[in-house]
């Protein structure tokens, strides 16, 4: 087999493989569009939830518990779940209100281009870093 025939065969093989590329690109484009849409939905949810304060969550939990208590005769199982949900919301909001704000968001300070070290990270900072590393492993 001559050298020229080998080159022609290789070129034909490469050209036949090129027919598959647009399909893969289309799949990638669809994935990117879906990811962009999900990111937009996440941004919209975070924009709405960022306006909700811890006090509002506690108030909503109390209203949920009281409403479920007054309507307990309608359906016991549903009101039981509503009361449990209200308690979980209330306890979660209470814990969030007790935790110090901005512990892990310490702004780095610079002096002459060097970061000023405030000492070892707190336990909260170490826990957040550990959970962040776990999330990135997936």
Image (cartoon, rainbow, N blue to C red):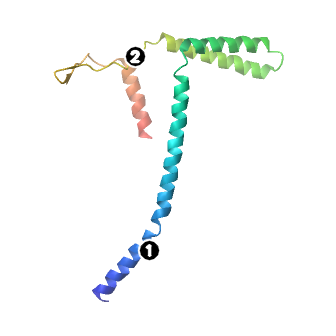
Relative placement, left or right, of 43 versus 64 is: left
The vertical placement of 129 against 59, above or below, is below
Query: Which residue sits furthest left?
Result: 112
The residue located at (23%, 18%) in the rendering is 117
Asked if 124 appears above or below 37 in the picture, the reply is: above
From the image, tell me which residue sits under label 1.
16
Q: Quadrant of residue 44?
A: top right
Quarter holding the N terminus is: bottom left
Left or right of 115, for residue 83:
right
Estimate the spatial distance between the alpha carbons at disc 2 and disc 1, rounded to whole Å. 58 Å
Residue 120 location (% of width, % of height): 28, 18
SS at badge 1? helix
Where residue 103 appears, as percent x and y from the top left, is 38, 16
Depth order, front residue of 109/72:
109
12 over 128 or under it: above or below? below
Residue ID for mark 2: 102
Q: Position of residue 113 (x, y in %)?
A: 18, 24
Q: Residue at x 37, y 21 (%)?
A: 125
Between 73 and 14, which is closer to the camera in this rendering? 14
Element type at mark 2? loop
């Amino acid at each position: 087999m001559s050298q020229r025939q080998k080159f022609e065969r290789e070129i034909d093989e490469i050209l036949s493989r090129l027919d598959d590329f647009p399909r893969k690109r289309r799949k990638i484009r669809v994935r990117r569009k879906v990811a962009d849409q999900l990111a937009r939905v996440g941004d919209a949810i975070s924009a709405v939830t960022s306006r909700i304060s811890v006090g509002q969550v506690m108030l909503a939990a109390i209203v949920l518990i009281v409403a479920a208590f007054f309507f307990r005769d309608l359906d016991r199982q549903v009101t039981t779940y509503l009361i449990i949900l209200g308690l979980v919301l209330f306890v979660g909001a209470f814990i969030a209100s007790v935790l110090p704000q901005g512990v892990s968001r310490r702004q780095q300070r610079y002096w002459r281009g060097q970061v000023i070290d405030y000492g070892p990270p707190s336990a909260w900072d170490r826990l957040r870093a550990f959970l962040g590393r776990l999330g990135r492993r997936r």
